Amino acid sequence: MMKKQWFIKIAFFALVAVAALGAVVMWLWNWLIPDLFHGPVITYIQALGLMILSRILLRGFFGPKNKCGHHGPPWMQMKGKFENMSPEERDKMRDLWKKRCGSYRDCSDSPSGSEEKQ
């Protein structure tokens, strides 16, 4: 019973947040776009549609995916892979990255990091 009440509260607050965000988008659009770009004034429903459209175009339906098709930031997946490696595999990976990118310690001696290496 408690989980059902918790779910109802979360759903209610999510709807309130979306409604408030739609009002903010409408207000900002109607405040900026007509004066700056001579664009149209939009309604509340159009602002909600604009939010949905931008979500679809910029993030996709289910959030960002990395190149492998996994959700979440790529560095988190790489961190997990690195932690599962043996010490020999880690050393081999570090050597490979040093060959490709150089050592990060090369530029830590200089305060700006932009001094040329000799």
Image (cartoon, rainbow, N blue to C red):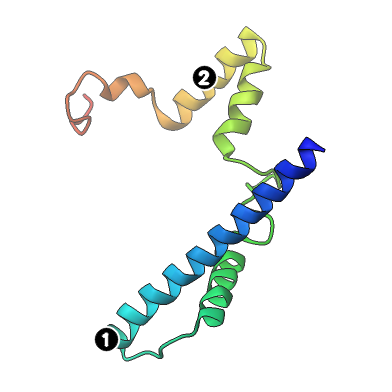
Residue 34 is left or right of residue 19, and the answer is left
Q: What's the residue at 36%, 23% (across, down)?
A: 104
Instruction: Give residue 103's quadrant in the image.
Output: top left
Residue at mark 2: 94
Q: Depth check: 85 or 17 in front?
A: 17
Q: What's the residue at 61%, 55% (across, down)?
A: 14
Q: Position of residue 100 (x, y in %)?
A: 47, 31
Q: Position of residue 30 (x, y in %)?
A: 37, 81
* Secondary structure under the numbered disc 2 in the rendered image: helix
53 over 15 or under it: above or below: below
85 over 2 or under it: above or below: above
Residue 61 is left or right of residue 74, and the answer is right
Q: Alpha-carbon distance for marks 1 and 2?
A: 54 Å
Q: Position of residue 76 (x, y in %)?
A: 58, 32
Residue at mark 1: 35
Q: What's the residue at 62%, 60% (across, down)?
A: 15
* Secondary structure under the numbered disc 1 in the rendered image: helix
Q: In the image, what residue type sits under mark 2?
A: Arg
User: Is the N terminus in the top left, top right, bottom left or bottom right quadrant?
Assistant: top right
Q: Depth check: 103 or 47 in front?
A: 47
Number of numbered discs overlaid on the protein picture: 2
| Residue 21, numbered label | none
Q: Depth check: 117 or 77 in front?
A: 77
Of the residues under marks 1 and 2, which one precedes in the sequence?
1
Q: Depth check: 19 or 54 in front?
A: 19
Q: In the image, what residue type sits under mark 1?
A: Asp
